[in-house]
Amino acid sequence: MGFLVDHTTRVLVQGITGNFGRSQTKLMQSYATQIVAGVTPGKGGSEAEGVPVFDSISEAIEKAGPIHATVIYVPAPFARAAVEEAAESLVPLIVVITEGIPLHDEMFLRQLTRSRNLWMIGPNCPGILVPGETSLGMIPPSSTSRGNVAVISRSGTLTFEITKVLTDEGIGQSVCVGIGGDRVIGRDFSDYLRLAEADPETKIIVMVGEIGGDAEERASLVIADEITKPIIGLLVGRHAPRGKRMGHAGAMISGNTGTIESKEQALTAAGVRLVPYLWELPEAIRLLGLPMGG
Amino acid sequence: MNLYEFEGKALLARLGVRTPRGVFCPDMTGVDEAGRTIGFPCVVKSQVLTGGRGKAGGITIVNSPDELSREADRIVRLKIGGETPVGLLVEERVPVDKEFYAAVAFDTSLACPVLLFSPRGGMEVEANTSSLLRIPVPVEDLPGIPPAWVAERLTPLLPQIETQALGAHLEGVTRLLANLLSAFGEYDLDLIEINPLVATHDGLIAADAKVTVDDDALFRQLETLGLVERPALPEFERRAREFGLNYVDLDGEICLMANGAGLNLSLLDAVAAFGSTPANFLDTGGGASRVKAYEGARILQDRSMRDPKVRARLIVLSLAITRAREATGGIAEAMDEFLNDPVPTFAVVHGTGADEGRDILERHGIKIAPDIRTAVEWAASAERGSGVGVHVDRAPVDPGGPLGEHRLIHDGSDHPAKGRA
């Protein structure tokens, strides 16, 4: 079994009939992702990229068989309903690509999916790709290669660049996952780090964080207690202007969290080796002296 | 989006929270009438979104109609932090007995709303946030939390002495907090803050209101809230927002554009690594459609043309959603509209259809780098005036052309991060 998903994962695409959903479906199919059904309310009975489209998830399950994961391309105003439907149907893995979902919807969906023991990746994420197995989302397969480094990132396109830098240097990945760039996401760094710790394919973890929030600080607590595999960290945004988007609310509540310095301190104390620039990742990985495969 | 004080207070009034009697005047026209309605002494408050109004002279107490029109005339024209007030709020002066602090905010760590309260509000709170009492609110409990729920949790947090100080106001406070909490959910708020919450002999009055609405929820709240028109954004921010891009002006030497926030952030750091400074941050979003790429490139051009400090432009595209042909086509179109361009442009293109994309950019005078480090290194050592567009008119650029010299001088050998290019 791969990291959350593998080649046997049966995937549903919500919002499959939109331009975006359609082109993404094609991209995933090119990576042999098993897309067994699509859902767009009102478009049931049609087809998109050779995939049967249904009005609802329950209908899709009834007619197309079991669904292990769903990838959601539904526009932000309707994303909450789409995730709720997936959660009602107990789809175990819900990948929410959509960006711009309201904060309150995200708080609700995080709580909903977690309380049902479902795994929501995102919102506002590029998805997950397990090299040689399957891809759910938009991580370009050409930038990845199979190996033993788990890339876990808050970012989207930066993740593509990182996997490319690793692949170009002959360092393969056990998984590439963008966990989501919004203030509230379904699963945190700590959840993914625990998976990486348990995953036999993963030997090294690359963790990519950025300014804002305290996801990295919280992760550092779990790292210190539970993670034995080496972690290389990259934090971006050191030279971003302070307070540009951090209004009064952020400052009042988080105190010193959200700054690179705070994250750096927490992660370093937890034993994470930090590199300042993405091009220094391959060397940092090689210095660990572990057999890399890939 | 932040609400003006008068908008925030209108929202509070809707919730049944008492606010000082007040009249909003967009200009001087209604000021005299407002004074007659409110009576004297009254308070004149500048309506700006920038903080620190009081210190900047934007709030004053007036005792007569003459003083009111004189002060109103001054304040309405007073820019605060570069911001012109949208109008004035003429308000009754509230006798202050005690000042509390009450708010509902979003707690990043817990991913849920948090109630904040302090029996000592006013200026003290901002200096001493640790004095705030915090009650996290489970998301599933959020709709319709009763005051009793709040009381049950707030009372044990209050030291004995504070409970006594709150005295008769405790019930009012819990009702108010429950009220703020329901508004927080109903109006998609990031923050609703009352500081100070003034305790008077006949109840609580919200003397100020700070309300922030989640930008991502404006599509369903803008109409409900009925807000006044916001001040115009600076040109580049405005142009960027119009096309769904995110622009932040900085004050450095290299104009940046990339598709994705993390990628942009990493460029800011990379630029610093090579001893230079970013002139801006410009995120086209992951998609980088032809239109977005075009508008972004135009902003980059205008920004770099108007500021002689800018030595280069740098564009990084890591594409998965759109084909490179689309994004680079948009950039090429912008380049075509801009001849005699003294600022050299460098680009990195990876992902779907990257070869074709690189080719398109190269044919329009953009120098292609194999990776981010190389691109930043070139840009950081480029000179204004070596602009590819000056020398080449939509013709392929000779790799050893005008920029070859810079490559030779700065081949990365003097830098700890040695180049692969």
Image (cartoon, coloured by chain):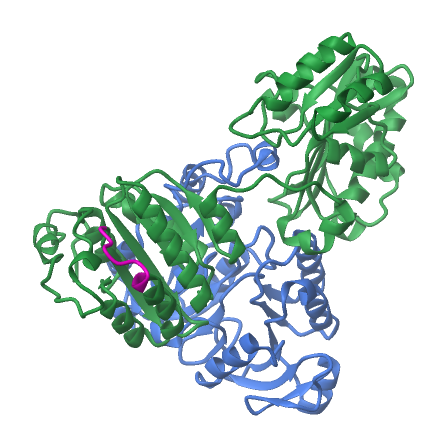
Chain colours: A blue, B green
Foreground residue among B160 and B246: B246
Q: Which residues are magenta?
A: B335-342
Residue at x 13% of width, y 65% of height: B399
Q: From what the image shows, is residue B90 above or below residue B233?
A: above
Is residue B202 among the parts visible in the rendering? Answer: yes
Q: Quadrant of residue A143?
A: bottom left
| Residue positioned 63% across, 19% down in the render | B75
The C terminus of chain A: image quadrant: bottom left
Q: Residue B289, image x and y in percent?
A: 45, 68
Classify residue B341 as left or right of residue B211: left
Residue B224, given in percent of the width and then of the height, sits at 78, 49
Q: In the image, is residue A269 above or below residue B258? A: above
Q: Which of the 4 image quarters holds residue A265?
A: top left
Horizontal side of B238 relative to B143 (left or right) equals: left
Say if residue A231 shows up in the picture.
no
Q: Position of residue A97 (x, y in %)?
A: 56, 67
Residue A106 coordinates in the image, percent (x, y): 66, 56
Query: Does B28 sit left or right of B408 as displayed?
Result: right
Q: For the point 41% across and 42% down, which residue is it?
A: B249
